Amino acid sequence: MNRLRNHSSGPLVITTLIAVAVSFLSGCEVPIASFSSNLVFAKRLEIDSGMKMEPAVNETQSILAEMFGTPDQPTWPKLLSEDQELAGLVSQQRLTRAAGAVRSDQQDNHFGLFREHCVHCHSVVGNGVGPTSSFLNPYPRDFRMGIFKFKTTPKGKKPTREDVMRLLTEGIMGTSMPSFRLLKQDDLEALTDYAIYLAIRGEVERRLMMEAASELDLDKGERLLDPALKESAPDDYQDQLRLIEETVTKVAQSWTGAASSVTKVEAPPADYPLFGRDTAGSKEAQDRLGASIANGRSIFHGKIANCASCHGNTAMGDGQTNDYDDWTKDWTILAKVDPRDKEHIQPFLDVGALKPRNILPRNLRSGIYRGGSQPVDLYHRIVQGIDGTPMPAVGLKPDNPQGLSTEEVWDLVNYLLSLPYEHITQQSSQVPPYQRENP
Amino acid sequence: MGKFWSLLFLCVPVLGTAMYLAGMYTSSGPLAMWFPENINPMAEEIDLLHDIILALSGVVFVATGLAIFLFMWCYECGCNKQLAKFVHGNHRVELWWTIIPTIVLVALAVYQFKVYADVRINRPMMAGADGVKGTADDVPEPASFEVMGRQFEWRIRYAGEDRLLDTPDDILGDVNELHCPTGTVMVGSLKSADVLHSFFIPALRLKNDMIPGTRQIVWFQADKIGSYEIVCAELCGWGHYKMKGRFVAEPPDQFQAYLQRLREKQFLREYVPAPPQPATDQVALDNQPTN
């Protein structure tokens, strides 16, 4: 009994106090967020130009910080907000709302939305190398090339605002991008602005670095914007400044131009057969649908669309399987680096590139369409191709006499929609390959 | 320390009971953490079972807490100068405290058989070949909707006019939004695209794991119009906590109109600048009825 009573609780109390104090003092330390440089692209330019890119990287970074701010305080460049046409592209208010640390107010309005919802995969600078990225297949999108796959505008054009918004609300089936449909409309608008902002910032960064690598002799100390010239040669300084501003404006203009370049798809006549809608319809409708699907099948295997060459004769995406997407090609094939050569790619992996993976043509029998499963979505994919991927756009009559007519595209759409329900053992083409004719 | 430890231990039953009571009888604020209102008549017995088990375990919880307090208070070594006496058990008492819990547990197990069977085994049936319901050739009612869990969202599909899933006339639902008509028994099919998820609609008392590679069948009936929460109840990855959906119970005619809207959207063959969003989008999740 006495032994127990003499046992002092002093050390225990002190240990506990120290533990509590340590956890209080250390818990709140958060590193200051900053936009990282595009070192992978710099590496490629370094190989291309044979110059050390470090000064250009640092300079680009400070020019960008001046114009675009930091992850905690992003700014929409002044020269863009002063331009009447470009001012509406991104609102400063929404940027501020989406940026910074995650926080919310008493009314449950959330701020720091990008870090709450996106940063895990897309990372702070939007380069698609967040903490989870290497576990995901496909990799998260790198916004900085300004290329977006699923949109309503032709290949090479930027997506419209609605296109970006749609990706956020619907998510992208078949990838790790989930839907954010239940977020408030304001939140989605803010995130859309922020994604566009990051894309523009990233593309400006690339262009400035490219400019530095191709036009300047960095080894001799030439700079994109030399503050020394401000006093000694103000005209030269103004020229340099103008060049940078033009780059920013050009990138922003490519975004504002998107809305006017939308591929406006007109519906075929209402009685034109459609898979799904007419599958259980009248005998006549079913016959017409059957004919449409058969025609679609021959287009799929035919010479003009030639879908089978990549998607495979069975449409399971097993045709051409050794290609790469533009995000990978950007630092491999374009830099004359073999993506399969481990030693060759190692310097790029060291600066943050993700291990190259082949881009696989879609398995069209899975019924999963990343860009949406509406007939109009498939139509867009066929006539526009898919940016950043080897999927080409098919020409349309009458602009392209060698191309397909819109009816033929709708037939192809019917065939695609029917594929998930077609038995896999059945031969997908009625005509053996050696007997096929050019339709 | 005197009576400090005995008083500290007294706090366990007192605060525990207070928290439960506050949770049950507070309607708003941080303490209001009781179940949302049950809108599923097929699950009323689940609530009843919960209440019975809570009452039984509550009695045991309070009694044990009080007993510990009493012993600590009476025999605290600082004030109790009596020497300890060692007792080698009491056969009769041990018998009773084994028999009574056994009876209670067996009774509970037998009582819940029916509830479990109704919720998990006795799938709703519909008339078979003879066209009459309730005869021997009844067939299980086919699932009229499908929910696929995916990191970190719910993908919804409804059976088309043929009332079967996986056929060309299936209707693709809005992501993260499940609609159903009120007053109708709904049978649904659950599956997962990647990892284990658990489909949980608290207002329906419906919770079922989604297991990759298999289909799970669930059924319920929603009797009150409103918008309720769908949550994931199985840790499925870093975004698990954000894996929310909206369950909308609406009158049958509105449900049919909703399906019609989905059909039109699914068969869209022309470019529409901003895709029209269903009106239910305006119903924010936090407006859902809770009690």
Image: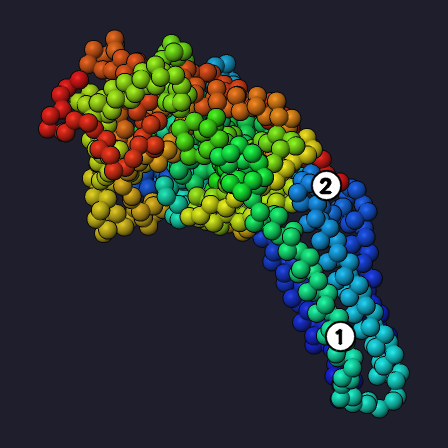
Compare residues A287 and B152 and report the one nearer the observer: A287
Residue B58 vertical placement versus A241 (above, below)? below
Residue named by callout 1:
B97
Total label count? 2
How far from the left and from the top, in percent, is residue A365? Answer: 32, 34
Name the quadrant of the C terminus of chain A: top left
At 42% across and 48% down in the image, what residue appears? B213
**Residue drawn where x is 76% and y is 46% of the image:** B32
Q: Is residue A194 shown to the viewer in this render?
A: no
Up-down relation of residue B22 to residue A123 (above or below): below
What residue did someone put label 2 on? B37
Residue B110 pos. (x, y %): 67, 60
Res B103 visible: yes
Query: How busy is the neighbourhood of tag 2: few (under 14 within 10 Å), some, or many (20 plus)?
Result: some
Across and down, in percent, residue B66 comes to: 83, 69
User: Looking at the picture, which amino acid does disc 2 mark?
Assistant: Glu
- Write down the chain letter for disc 1: B
In the picture shown, does residue B95 fall above or below A362? below
**Callout 1 environment at 10 Å: few (<14), some (14 to 19), or many (20+)?**
few
**Kind of residue indicated by mark 1:** Trp
